[in-house]
Image (cartoon, rainbow, N blue to C red):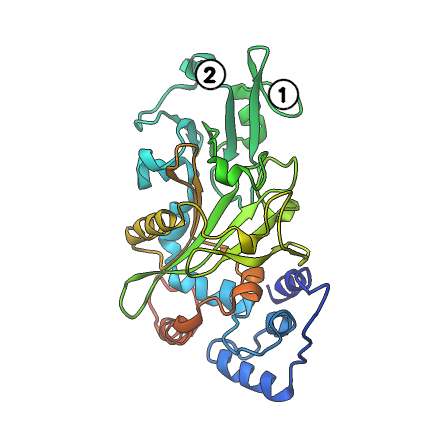
C-alpha cells in the first residue's frame, strides 16, 4: 500500500513550482510525530507534494497510506459500508425520486424490477422495457470506481448500440459483466453544467463527514469533475479536470488534471474565478447532508451528484470506500482540517479495542 500510494503521489508532483518550499528536518520530525500516533512509518510523499503546491508546511496533510489503511476503514464500518455502494440498490436506499431511473438490475445473478420483484430471465423483453428510450447507461454495480465499466448506448436504426456497434441484449450484458450490473436512464444535465463539457455528465464529488464528537454532518470538501473534450465520462484519469469549490460556493481560481497541470478555465468558458457561485450548489450541499444523515454506519461519504436539465439535484453514486483525497489536499489543504485531531483520537481508540468484529491488531 505504501508503494502504491507513493506512485500515485508521484503522478501529482507539480510540473511547475512557482513558490518553492523545501521540507525541513524539523518539519519531517513534527509530521512523523503527529501521524506517528497512528503509524510511525507514515509516508512523506504527500506532505512533500503539499509544500510544493502551497509553499508552506501543514502537519495535518493526511498521508494516503494512513488514510486508506486506517482512517477510512475505521470511520466506515467495513462490515456494512460496501453494501451501500451497490449501484443496483441506490434508489431503494436513497429514494427513486433522487436517482436516475433504473430499468433493469442484476444483483448476484438475479434480475429485479424497480419494485423489487424478481423477474425470470426468459421473461425479460428489453425492447419493450426500453421502448421510446433513445440513450441508456449500462455499468457494473459493485467493485468498480472511477467510471470503469460504464458504457453509453444510443439508439441507431431502432436498436441500442455502444461505440463498438454492439447491440444491447442480455447476452451482451452477461458476457461483459457476468452479474451485478444495471441498465439505467442517461441523465441530461443542466445547461449550466453542460457548458463545461457537453459530451460528459459533469458531476460534483461532495465529501461529507459525520463528526465523532457531535455526530453532526459537515462538508469536508467539494469539487466539480469536468470530462475531457469528446469524452462521455467525467473521470479525471481519462483526461478530465477537477475544480474545487470555496466555502461560499464559488469556484477556485484553478482546476487540476490527473497530471497535476493547472487549468484556469475549460473550453471557451470564462475563467473559473469569473464564474461566481456554482448553480444550485446550496441545494447540492443540503442534499449531500440529507443522504449522509441516514448512512449511520459510515462517517465518511464521497457522493457523486449532478444537476439535471430541470434543475433537480440527482444522486449518481455513493462511495463508502476508496474515496479519493490526493489532489484535493494540494488544492484545499488538509482533508479533515479542523477535525483532524478528533479523527486521530477516535482512530487511536478504535485500534485499541478488541472485539470479534475487529480487523486490526492492536
**Nearest the camera: 66 or 232?**
232
The N terminus, quarter of image: bottom right
Q: Nearer the viewer, residue 220 or 211?
A: 220
What is the crowding at mark 2: few (fewer than 14 residues within 10 Å), some, or many (at least 20)?
some
Give coordinates of residue 261: x percent, y percent: 68, 57
Residue located at (35% from left, 25% from top): 113
- Which residue is found at the position 65% from the left and 44% from the top? 238
Q: Position of residue 207 (x, y in %)?
A: 43, 56
Query: Front-most of 349 and 230?
Result: 230
For label 1, the crowd category at 10 Å Cα-Cα, with few meaning under 14, some 14 to 19 and many 20 or more, is few
- The percent position of residue 167, horizontal first and vertical second, equals 59, 18
Among numbered discs 2 and 1, the one appearing first in the sequence: 2
Most distant residue in the bottom direction: 26
The x, y position of residue 76, in whole percent, is 38, 59
Q: Which mark is residue 244?
A: none
Residue 152 vertical position relative to residue 287 in the rendered view, above or below:
above
Q: Name the residue at 56% across, 64% down.
A: 331
Q: Nearer the viewer, residue 319 or 120?
A: 319
The residue pinned by badge 1 equals: 166
Q: Which residue is mark 2?
A: 126
How far apart, in angstroms, are the residues tagged by discs 2 and 1? 15 Å
- Answer with left or right where residue 360 lies relative to residue 172: left
Count how many numbered circles sit on residues in the image: 2
- Left or right: 240 in relation to 145: right
The quadrant of the picture occupied by the C terminus is bottom left
Amino acid at each position: 500500500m505504501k508503494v502504491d500510494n507513493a506512485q500515485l503521489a508521484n503522478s501529482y508532483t507539480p510540473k511547475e513550482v512557482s513558490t518553492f518550499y523545501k521540507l525541513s528536518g524539523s518539519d519531517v520530525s513534527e509530521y512523523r510525530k503527529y501521524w506517528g500516533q497512528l503509524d510511525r512509518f507514515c509516508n512523506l510523499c504527500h506532505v512533500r507534494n503539499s509544500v510544493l503546491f502551497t509553499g508552506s508546511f501543514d502537519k495535518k496533510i493526511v498521508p494516503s497510506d494512513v488514510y486508506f489503511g486506517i482512517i477510512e476503514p475505521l470511520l466506515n464500518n467495513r462490515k456494512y459500508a460496501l453494501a451501500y455502494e451497490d449501484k443496483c440498490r441506490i434508489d431503494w436506499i436513497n429514494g427513486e425520486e433522487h436517482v436516475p431511473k433504473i430499468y433493469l438490475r442484476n444483483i448476484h445473478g438475479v434480475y429485479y424490477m424497480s419494485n423489487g420483484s424478481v423477474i425470470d430471465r426468459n421473461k425479460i423483453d428489453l425492447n419493450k422495457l426500453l421502448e421510446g428510450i433513445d440513450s441508456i447507461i449500462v455499468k457494473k454495480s459493485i467493485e468498480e470506481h472511477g467510471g470503469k465499466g460504464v458504457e453509453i448506448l444510443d439508439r441507431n436504426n431502432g436498436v441500442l448500440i455502444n461505440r463498438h456497434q454492439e447491440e444491447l441484449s442480455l447476452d451482451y450484458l452477461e458476457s461483459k459483466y457476468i452479474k451485478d450490473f444495471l441498465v439505467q436512464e442517461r441523465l441530461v444535465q443542466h445547461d449550466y453544467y453542460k457548458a463545461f463539457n457537453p459530451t460528459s455528465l459533469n458531476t460534483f464529488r461532495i465529501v461529507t463527514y459525520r463528526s465523532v464528537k457531535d455526530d453532526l454532518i459537515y462538508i469536508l470538501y467539494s469539487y466539480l469533475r469536468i470530462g475531457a473534450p469528446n469524452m462521455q465520462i467525467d473521470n479525471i484519469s481519462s483526461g478530465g479536470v477537477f475544480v474545487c469549490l470555496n466555502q461560499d460556493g464559488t469556484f477556485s481560481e484553478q482546476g487540476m488534471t490527473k497530471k497535476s497541470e493547472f487549468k484556469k478555465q475549460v473550453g471557451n468558458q470564462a475563467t473559473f474565478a469569473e464564474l461566481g457561485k456554482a448553480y444550485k450548489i446550496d441545494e447540492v450541499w443540503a442534499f449531500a447532508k440529507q443522504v449522509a444523515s441516514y448512512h449511520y454506519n459510515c462517517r465518511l461519504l464521497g457522493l457523486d451528484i449532478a444537476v439535471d436539465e430541470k434543475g433537480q439535484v440527482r444522486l449518481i453514486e455513493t462511495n463508502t470506500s476508496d474515496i479519493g483525497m490526493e489532489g484535493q489536499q494540494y488544492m484545499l489543504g488538509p482533508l479533515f482540517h479542523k477535525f483532524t485531531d478528533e479523527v486521530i483520537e477516535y482512530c487511536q481508540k478504535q485500534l485499541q479495542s478488541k472485539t470479534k468484529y475487529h480487523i486490526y491488531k492492536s
